[in-house]
């Protein structure tokens, strides 16, 4: 597994590339389009673009520039976030160089890619012992497997103060049965035909049942979450129940719904309603919040 900081940098780099490209207002090709096309070719192990061919035409022929930008960004997100290796790779150097060209920055002066473009993100000062105190009914081996991903998730999604962390962990403990269940026990037949969730194909109920520490449910939510995390969850929905994505999907949901603001106000009712849609299990959530606050000295 890559270091937490390198994992965060890769995710932030993918976000920055997306932001830069999709903020282009002109439907005509720009210099940035050439840089992005070159990066896509590098990360896809494709040859350099022929001099007589416009950006995107090799990857997305006959598409408009606007459509090609969206498709390129979607592919680049997966490629950048899923760069393998616990140390910096040649692909990281390619991403760093492309970002510098897009941002009109000088060449890198440090050995490490990303460091001069993106700030370092400190990890929470939470230990396994803290988690075992907050969630005493958690299976220790399961919790140990989740632990590094929980730290990474909190760092990446701004769950950065003891108050936020207490609310986040308390909600996760309730939602996952003390971190013991990474997908709902029900097979998901009750979700079949739920067009409001995007479950429009036979079998979608079971295929896209609740998974992750904050249960992501339904085809539409799987697609949105997967896009954010750089994973095709439509093709591989059970990935959401694996340790890394079970945690990261919870952070994505927390961030997307701007729950930190409610945690900052210590508004456990609003936090709960945002996650649950109501107050189901409210007493249990409050109970674990109290423990978390004590352990984290809130």
Image (cartoon, rainbow, N blue to C red):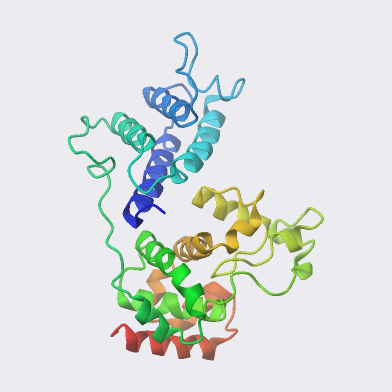
Residue found at the far left of this picture? 109
Q: Which of 105 and 83 is in front in this view?
A: 83
Specify the quadrant of the image occupied by residue 293: bottom left
Specify the quadrant of the image occupied by residue 289: bottom left
Residue 27 on image: x %, y %:
49, 26
Q: Dividing the image into 4 quarters, which one contains the C terminus?
A: bottom left
Residue 183 on image: x %, y %:
63, 69
129 vs 49, left or right, is: left
Say how many tags the image has.
0
Residue 205 on image: x %, y %:
75, 62
Q: Nearer the viewer, residue 14 or 129?
A: 129
72 vs 189, left or right, is: left
Q: Is residue 291 above or below residue 162?
A: below
Q: Is residue 17 above or below residue 197?
A: above
Q: Dividing the image into 4 quarters, which one contains the N terminus?
A: bottom left
Q: Which of 224 and 121 is in front in this view?
A: 121
Q: Is residue 202 visible?
A: yes
Residue positioned 22% across, 34% down in the render = 108
Q: In this view, does 177 lie above or below 154?
A: below
Residue 39 on image: x %, y %:
42, 29
Residue positioned 28% across, 40% down in the render = 113
Residue positioned 23% across, 32% down in the render = 105
Residue positioned 56% across, 31% down in the render = 67
């Amino acid at each position: 597994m890559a270091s937490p900081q390198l994992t965060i940098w890769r995710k932030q780099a993918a976000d920055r590339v997306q932001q830069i490209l999709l903020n282009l207002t002109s439907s005509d090709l720009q210099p940035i389009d050439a840089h992005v096309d070159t990066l896509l070719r590098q990360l896809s192990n494709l040859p350099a673009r022929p001099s007589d061919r416009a950006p995107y035409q090799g990857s997305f022929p006959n598409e408009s520039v606007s459509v090609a930008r969206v498709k390129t960004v979607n592919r680049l997100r997966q490629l950048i976030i899923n760069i393998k290796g616990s140390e910096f790779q040649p692909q990281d150097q390619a991403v760093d160089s492309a970002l510098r060209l897009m941002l009109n920055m000088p060449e890198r002066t440090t050995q490490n890619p990303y460091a001069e473009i993106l700030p370092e993100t400190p990890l929470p000062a939470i230990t396994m012992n803290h988690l075992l105190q907050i969630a005493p009914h958690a299976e220790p081996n399961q919790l140990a497997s989740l632990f590094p991903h929980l730290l990474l998730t909190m760092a990446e999604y701004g769950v950065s103060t003891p108050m936020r962390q207490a609310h986040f962990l308390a909600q996760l403990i309730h939602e996952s049965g003390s971190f013991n269940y990474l997908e709902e026990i029900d097979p998901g037949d009750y979700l079949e035909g739920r067009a409001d969730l995007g479950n429009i194909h036979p079998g979608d109920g079971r295929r896209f049942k609740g998974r992750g520490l904050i249960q992501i449910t339904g085809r539409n939510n799987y697609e949105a979450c997967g896009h954010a995390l750089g994973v095709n969850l439509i093709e591989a929905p059970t990935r959401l129940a694996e340790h890394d994505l079970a945690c990261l999907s919870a952070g994505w949901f927390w961030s997307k719904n701007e729950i930190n603001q409610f945690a900052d106000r210590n508004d456990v009712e609003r936090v709960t309603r945002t996650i649950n849609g109501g107050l189901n299990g409210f007493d249990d959530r409050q109970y674990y919040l109290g423990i978390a606050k004590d352990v984290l000295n809130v």
